[in-house]
Image (tube, coloured by chain):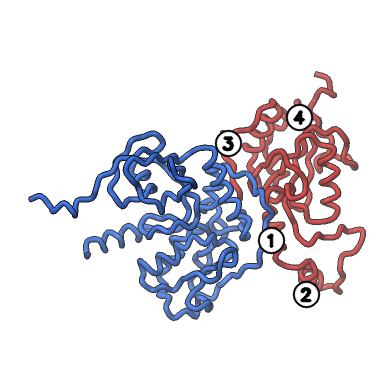
Chain colours: A red, B blue
Amino acid sequence: MTENKKIRMATIWLDGCSGCHMSFLDMDERLIEIAQKVELVYSPYVDTKEFPENVDVTLMEGAIGSDHDLELLHKIRKNTKTLIAFGDCAVTGNVTAMRNTFTVESIFQRAYVETVDTPPKMPAAPVPTLLPKAKPLHEYVPVDFFIQGCPPNADLIYYILTELLAGRKPGTEVPMRFG
Amino acid sequence: MTPPLATVPLILTLTIDGQEVGAREGQTIFEVAKENNIPIPALCNLEGLPNLGACRLCVVEVKGARRLLPACATNVSEGMEVSTTNEKLQKYRKMVLELLFAERNHTCSVCVSNGRCELQGQAQAQGMDHVHVPYLFPKQLVDASHPKFVADHNRCILCQRCVRVCDEIEGAHTWDVMGRGINSKVITDMFEPWGLSESCTHCGKCVQVCPTGALFEKGKSVAEMVKKRQFLPYLNTMRKYHE
């Protein structure tokens, strides 16, 4: 099989904790099997700077919390055939969305003024601006598949990826739930 | 000796999912289905508490009825033809769950009931993979004023099991519902902090019957809250013998 016949896959983590990506790595030796079928074109695991065009599958971890996240989401949706919401933050907002009942100003006040030992300083450009609420991906763009879990366990990730790579729609053989 | 005819419950015959079943007059579809090992999903219903019909997860299709009917609040009748599982019901059950998730802040991953929650379990059982409506992220109260228990309204689904167990089993009626529609909330006494309630007996029955992590024991962390409900059949049996 030549290199360009591989499935072009990307992964990204936005407003999340990287736990889903850690769980991805927990596939251990099965990663070798996955690697034979896919070319990882963009990911925190590799060093590509710009999100490429013509991506077949993107696993997106994290909620949409900042203007930068939102810009990336729209670009990735445009460049990706199958967009997968990867983990509870991407599917529901999860822990990331727990800030949503407070204003951004009051959160910044708590994080950068009330609880710091050093002279207080608010984050400014080029740090992305927080949106008023952290929201799941599908509230902005159509999402093709949802993987629940905080984090989704490695067996579930493996099952869903191998089913999708084989051109099948994943069923419920490996149970999936929130939390 | 033959008892007078009036005291003999009328025996009815109906079909549930094509299966012929017998039932006594006055039984609900939910009870008859359960007796015949036909599972119907439910959240507000709990054996030993009076039926309420609050969650709408147990909706079933009855031939000839123009709308879906809650199995827990619909009595059986002769010749009734009930469907408990089909695509339409699945769609509505998922919708019920999605609305429950959207109208409060259910963060399963950091909940005391993670892995043991009935709402979380039903979402999995019904194949609810995401919530189609926008989340509301409402500001909700957390009442930690009680010395033993906490009420986290972010996780409440308004099933009113706490209200029913406190009124009907414990006899205290500390819990009730305040407000209407989406603004409804369960309250203690006259919407006073739980810890200041004069009617609360500190029995904890409300905590044990709560299907989610909305009511839990103080000191329990993520996934640590195990609800113990053995008292419910026990007290109901005792009561029956005393009547």
Mark 2 residue crowding within 10 angstroms, few (<14) / some (14–19) / many (20+): few
* Earlier-in-chain disc, 1 versus 4: 4
- Disc number lying in front (3 or 4): 3
Q: What amino acid is labelled 4 in the image?
A: Ala
Element class at badge 2: helix
- Residue B103 showing in the rendered view: yes
Q: Tell which subunit mark 1 falls on.
A: A
Residue B17 x %, y %: 41, 36
Q: Quadrant of residue A158?
A: top right
| Amino acid type, residue under disc 3 in the picture | Val
Q: Which mark is residue A174?
A: 3
Total labels: the figure holds 4
Q: Is residue A49 above or below residue A136?
A: above
The lab-note entry on whether marks 1 and 2 share a chain reads yes
Pair 1/2: label in front? 1
Q: Quadrant of residue B64?
A: top left
Q: Considering the image in quadrants, where does the C terminus of chain B appear?
A: bottom left
Q: Is residue A160 left or right of residue B89?
A: right
> Which residue is labeled 2 in the image?
A114
Q: Is residue B15 left or right of residue A29?
A: left
Disc 1 crowd, CA 10 A, few/some/many (<14, 14-19, 20+): some
Residue assigned mark 4: A35
Question: Do tags 2 and 3 sit on the same chain?
Answer: yes
Q: Residue at x 84, y 23 (%)?
A: A3
Circle number at residue A98:
1
User: For the residues marked 1 and 4, what is the alpha-carbon distance in whole angstroms?
Assistant: 36 Å
Q: Which mark identifies residue B150?
A: none
Whether residues under marks 3 and 4 lie with C-beta atoms below 8 angstroms apart, the answer is: no
